[in-house]
């Protein structure tokens, strides 16, 4: 497993949608060429539709220590029916990747479609991490030339894992509030206890 801790903390990787399709996904899946050396340690091999929770994946690749950086993975889709039209998008113990909006086509400079991106969100109402994670799933374009996503090459996607910072900040603020509230409650109980002792002494 490649670890992004090997990448310089000063390096920021923010590829465009077109670069993800043409420079990463197309080269690896269709041309079967190795990635550009500058991408080494950045695009990882990890199952984002398996048993590992998204926050665990995030921690394993060091993103809890780096601000404003996403994680990129080459993943293989898991088909769940004979026609291969439906995809397994579960993650962790009880989570799923839920679609946020309709897939968006990605075009090259000549306005030819080259791929699409599907916006997903982590959904698990039983977890405090519900809606805390986003997954952008990039796939190659399904054309009219006989190629479609039932062929092996099109079962691979590039996934960008992102943290929903608005949700994360709310969770962190809630934890901070509870942590600060506990000492105040202890102090209040001690103060009331002292008042009781003082009142008893006065009566004597």
Image (spheres, rainbow, N blue to C red):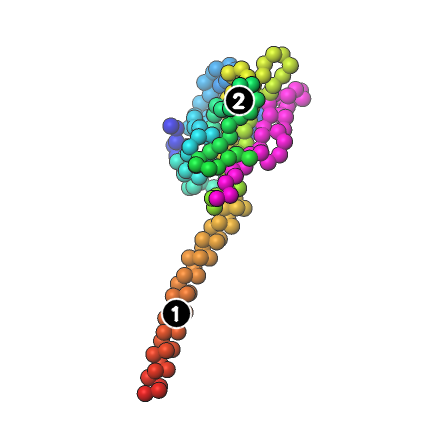
Inspect the magenta stretch and tell me whether residue 100 lies in it. yes
Secondary structure type for disc 2: loop
Name the residue furthest front.
Answer: 82
- Mark 2, Cα crowd under 10 Å, few <14 / some 14-19 / many 20+, is few
Name the residue furthest right.
Answer: 111
Q: Residue 36, percent across and down?
A: 47, 21
According to the image, label 2 marks what residue? 81
Q: Residue 138, percent across and down?
A: 55, 26
Of the residues under marks 2 and 1, which one precedes in the sequence? 2
Q: Is residue 31 visible?
A: yes
According to the image, label 1 marks what residue? 189
Q: Is residue 163 above or below residue 72?
A: below
* Label 2, label 1: how far apart the Cα atoms are: 61 Å
Inspect the magenta stretch and tell me whether residue 32 lies in it. no
Q: Residue 158, percent across and down?
A: 51, 26
Closer to the camera in the image, 60 or 201: 201
Closer to the camera in the image, 192 or 2: 192
Quarter-of-image position of residue 147: top right
Left-right relation of 201 to 100: left
Q: Is residue 29 above or below residue 62?
A: above
Q: Which residues are magenta?
A: 99-126
Residue pictured at 62% horizontal, 34% vertical = 101
Closer to the camera in the image, 18 or 177: 177
């Amino acid at each position: 497993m490649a670890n992004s801790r090997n990448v310089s903390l000063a390096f920021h990787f923010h590829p465009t949608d077109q670069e993800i399709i043409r420079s990463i996904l197309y080269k690896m899946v269709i041309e079967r060429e190795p990635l550009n050396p500058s991408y080494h340690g950045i695009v990882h091999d990890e199952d984002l539709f398996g048993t590992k929770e998204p926050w665990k994946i995030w921690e394993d690749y060091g993103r809890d220590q780096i601000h404003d950086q996403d994680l990129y993975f080459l993943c293989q889709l898991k088909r769940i029916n004979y026609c291969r039209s439906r995809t397994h998008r579960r993650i962790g113990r009880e989570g799923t990747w839920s679609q946020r909006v309709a897939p968006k086509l990605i075009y090259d400079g000549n306005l030819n479609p080259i791929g699409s991106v599907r916006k997903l969100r982590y959904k698990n109402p039983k977890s405090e991490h519900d809606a805390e994670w986003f997954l952008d799933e990039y796939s190659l374009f399904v054309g009219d030339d006989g190629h479609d996503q039932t062929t092996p090459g099109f079962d691979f996607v590039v996934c960008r894992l992102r943290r929903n910072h608005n949700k994360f900040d709310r969770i962190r603020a809630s934890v901070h509030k509870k942590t600060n509230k506990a000492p105040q409650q202890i102090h209040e109980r001690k103060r009331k206890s002292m008042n009781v002792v003082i009142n008893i002494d006065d009566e004597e």
